Amino acid sequence: MKLPLGPAQRWFAGAALAACTLLGAAPSSALAQGLIRDAEIEDTLRVYTNPLLQAAGLNPADVDLYIIGDPSINAFVAGGQNIFIHTGLVMEAVTPNEVIGVLAHETGHIAGGHGARRSQYASNQALGPMLISLALGVLAIAGGEPGAGAALISGSQQFAMSSFVQYTQAQEASADQAGLSYLEATGQSGQGLISLFNRELRPYEFRTRRIPPYMMTHPFASDRVESLRVGVDAGSHRDAVVGADTERRFRYMQAKLVGFTRTLAQTLARYPTTDLSGPARYARAVAYYRVSDLALARGELDVLMADEPNNPYYQELMGQILFENGRAEESIAFHRRSLELSPNQPLLQTNLARALIQARGRRGADEAIDLLRLVTAAEPDNAFAWRELAQARNERGEEALAELASAEQSFALGDYGLALSFAERARRTLPRSTPDYQRAADIVTFAGAEVRERARQQGGGRRPG
């Protein structure tokens, strides 16, 4: 697990307006929390989500999933076909069906094009009532009714907001029903959404009832639950039970997140040492490793690995524990084994490459570069992989290629000034008419344009002295 890593954050703020949230929480809070990368959790969420996307007529390869380190129970769609899941949702869910139900709801937003339509409506459709109210206010003042005119003008924003929230409420209700149809199509129950809403929303509805109706972007929880209940009861999979693999993935995903994001005391309270189940040992292994108790961490993990020697994520965790405790050479075998058991996983490829560079320097750089080139081809915005590639290039004395990789890293992070600097230096010495030279030139062009535009915006309000 990498916590946090945020290559997508540079566009996140611009996507906030178009965000479609499950519970109505502000997505911008995720910026402060950061994005989490973990091969096992991402794989589980993919296994849960892909059938829903296919049922909605979407291509799973076109939809990106992001995990946000945030304890609140929420998920949302933003920036197009991007689903964001809070760690709090996964850790506090009672059944895998609750998480899958939320993913079905978010799939409904994507299939309905709600993000783009919401943004367009906010900037166009909702503007109409506000302009009408402003015009009526001006006419009232001109007609000798200044009090009425002032009231109309001051209420113009309320008119616009009222129109907008009616639109978003309709979208949320539509996503709920679309999600139910995808669950039904994949042979799954919609009971998870009902239980989640009943537990996490309905107890607090008395608070939302006090909010002015024109501020309510989501329907009331009780209305959503009753509407969902009708749909679930009408389906043929109302009492469908999740499979053993779905349940197992859920329990291990929860345990891993608890171990990584909660304190040792909190982890042990949830998974006491008397609990000898696999998920409990997994959570404790992570929690012990995080407080540098290597002996206890390895003890728990040794039991798990003995029971499941072909689990790639146990191998990955053992490699991570060893690597981060200064035993990079010893970690290589575990990272290599994890990749053998789960080939072509970019995060597992990055783990092995990093261990090779740290342990063997120049001798490990050749293999590390091959691995990292695969990673950056699959994930061009993976700033962490670009950083490791820059280090590997540097180990081989390839200064220009190291600078190009650093330019890619900075570009992925949105640091266009630094990206421009590295790319310009790389371009000076890279052979012309090569793909690497052309890429450096492209970064110079795009990053340079961003730098100039930002400088123009910053200086736009200044007057010459």
Image (cartoon, rainbow, N blue to C red):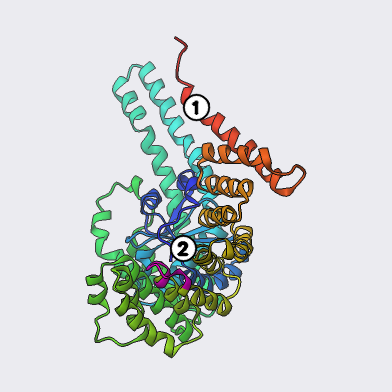
| Residue 111, percent from left and from top | 57, 60
Residue 295 lies, with reference to residue 434, above or below; the image says below
Position of the C terminus, as image quadrant, is top left
Q: Earlier in the sequence, mark 1 or mark 2?
A: 2
Q: Secondary structure at mark 1?
A: helix
Q: Is residue 187 magenta?
A: no
Which residue, as the protein is rendered here, is positioned at the far top?
465
Position of the N terminus, as image quadrant, is bottom left
Q: Are marks 1 and 2 in contact (CB under 8 Å)?
A: no
Label 2 belongs to which residue? Answer: 37
User: Which labelled disc corresponds to residue 457?
Assistant: 1
- Residue 113 falls left or right of residue 98: right
Packing grade of label 2 (10 A; few <14, some 14-19, many >=20) is some
Residue 443 lies, with reference to residue 203, above or below; the image says above
- Residue 66 falls left or right of residue 434: left
Q: Is residue 324 magenta?
A: yes
Nearest to the observer: residue 450 or residue 316? 316
Please identify the quarter of the rendering in which residue 379 is found. Answer: bottom right
User: Which labelled disc corresponds to residue 184?
Assistant: none
| Residue 428, percent from left and from top | 67, 37
Read off the magenta span.
322-329
